[in-house]
Image (spheres, helix red, strand yellow):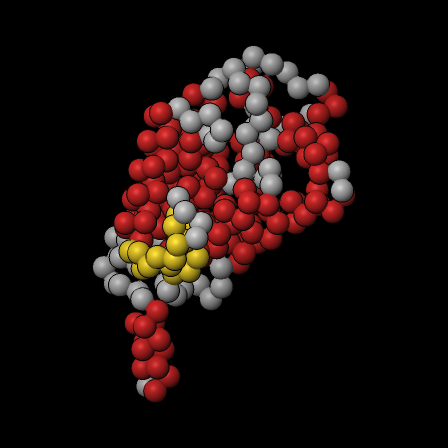
Amino acid sequence: MFVPIYDANRLRRIRFQYVTVGLIVVNVVIYLVFTATGETGALLSAFEITYGFIPAVVNGYADLPPHYVAVPEALNFVTYAFLHLNFWHLLGNMLFLWVFGDNVEDAFGHLRFLLFYLACAAAGAWLHAMVMPDSEATLIGASGAVSGVAAAYLMLHPRVWVWVLAFGRIPLYLPAWLLLAIWIGWQFALFIAGGEDVSYAAHAGGIVAGAALTLVLRQKGVPLFDSRIETPRAVELKRKDEGGA
């Protein structure tokens, strides 16, 4: 529905979003490994089974063949979030992370943001497993974790304006509260409706975890629902004022 492109919301507490960029690099590199082999289908299928999240396995309804077991079962609650089915799946998740992740990392600090991201991924997998306990389909993708980041951004910076592409082609300039409220509401609507092609349960789990964790993981002095409005023009004027001071 909406693809975020840019927000004029500068960092206030950290110099650079190392964790956000690191997560994007890891996701892209893992995806490129499969693309570069020329055997993406077979290789990714095997990697999905090993590192993806399979509810039936986690809930004890099925067992992985021994040659697919490479990590403790509990790690699949987060390893699945670093695999993507195709370029568009990867691009959509990484755009959300790029636009919104830096400011959430700024509010939490580097280590807390990393823990937050992984916890949201795990929460998304957990709810997916609760909704589809005996499913043998593999869940992959960073959507659960990224959904948590979007929820955190909404709670931290609802008044920031964001450039988005609506329906993938129409550029719009919207306040974050409107953009993310619509997006989050849409995820829950599809979750309730029982969408089959995408795990909206994972999105919903990530959103709830993201909102709850924002209450406790943000650094001291970081307000909720920041009242400062950041627009490209306001940021430019602020930089000129600081440069002339």
Q: In percent of the image, x 30 and y 65: which residue is there?
A: 230
Image coordinates for residue 233, horizontal then vertical, percent: 32, 72
As drawn, 244 above or below 172:
below
Image coordinates for residue 61, horizontal then vertical, percent: 56, 12
Q: In this view, does 69 lie to the left or right of 143?
A: right
Q: In this view, does 66 lie to the left or right of 176?
A: right
Q: In percent of the image, x 35 and y 82: which residue is there?
A: 240
Residue 70 in sight from this viewpoint: no
Image coordinates for residue 11, horizontal then vertical, percent: 40, 64
| Quarter-of-image position of residue 54 | top right
Q: In this view, does 48 lie to the left or right of 121?
A: right
Residue 31 in sight from this viewpoint: yes
- Find the residue positioned furthest to the top: 61
Image coordinates for residue 189, horizontal then vertical, percent: 33, 31
Q: Nearer the viewer, residue 168 or 5?
A: 168
Q: In this view, does 36 lie to the left or right of 78?
A: right
Q: In percent of the image, x 37 and y 30: which residue is there?
A: 190
Q: Which of 72 and 89 is in front in this view?
A: 89
As drawn, 231 above or below 224:
below
Numbered marks: total: 0
| Quarter-of-image position of residue 120 | top left
